[in-house]
Amino acid sequence: MGRRRWRPSSASRSPGTKGRSARARCCPRPALEIYFDGVRALPDGVWTRGSCPWCGGAAGYGDLLEDGRRRLSCHLCGGAWIAARLRCPFCESWNSRDLARLVAEDLEAAYFIEGCRACRGYVKGVDRRQRWNAGPPLVEDWGSPHLDLHAAREGYWRATPSLAHLLPPEAGDAR
Ligand SMILES: [Zn+2]
Ligand SMILES: [Zn+2]
């Protein structure tokens, strides 16, 4: 499957409801980051849920750190936490057979999409052992709308909107 490149459209320059939804999700973040500053420390193993331990938001990105641990990130408040590698953050299934790694043949190395066959949710991620200079989770997430389109074509959904969702339905398959 060929990779679609991101093409700004008139709709993306003047986003509608979905665009406002994407922006609204990140607007409280600066205030929340200040509010939560100083209480972000979380010992490993204390929090085992797939949602954000500070604000309850859904996981927006899931990357692999240099030591191989999986880190989920919350775009709403900027929090991040260590999570189990083989557990869906949405339906919290532990069944490894439910997990699918969705990657197109010509996608960049180290970037991946992890989907759940049980609930059809997905998160994108980057393996920082291979891509040590990758940017912050929100930047990497918003900078890879082609991965969202790929996941949408495969029948998966994501809990938090991203830039790909600024596209009108006829220009992209992500909804
Ligand atoms: Zn949060
Ligand atoms: Zn699931």
Image (cartoon, rainbow, N blue to C red):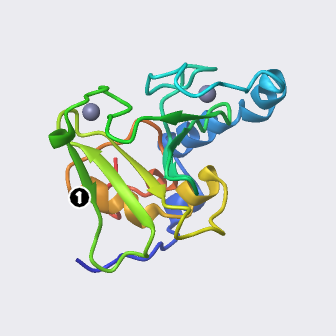
Q: Nearer the viewer, residue 36 or 71?
A: 71
Q: Nearer the viewer, residue 118 or 49?
A: 49
Q: Nearer the viewer, residue 56 or 31?
A: 56
**Would residue 171 appear left or right of 33 to someone viewing this image?**
left
Q: Position of residue 51 (x, y in %)?
A: 48, 25
Location of residue 155 with respect to 25 vertically, above or below = below
Amino acid beneath label 1: Arg
At x 56%, y 63%, the residue is 143
**Would residue 30 appear left or right of 146 to someone viewing this image?**
right
The residue where tag 1 is placed is 153
Q: Position of residue 44 (x, y in %)?
A: 57, 28
At x 58%, y 57%, the residue is 66
Taking the image as drawn, is residue 10 in sight? yes
Q: Residues within 10 Å of mark 1 (few under 14, many from 20)?
A: few
Taking the image as drawn, is residue 162 in sight? no
Q: Position of residue 155 (x, y in %)?
A: 20, 49
At x 34%, y 60%, the residue is 149
User: The residue tagged with tag 1: helix, strand or loop?
Assistant: helix
Quadrant of ligand 2: it is: top left
Location of residue 152 with respect to 91 vertically, above or below = below
For the N terminus, the image quarter is: bottom left
Q: Nearer the viewer, residue 166 or 135?
A: 135
Q: How many marks?
A: 1
On whether ligand 2 comes within 8 Å of the CB at mark 1, the answer is no
Q: Position of residue 10 (x, y in %)?
A: 52, 65
Q: Residue 5 occupies which quadrant of the picture?
A: bottom left
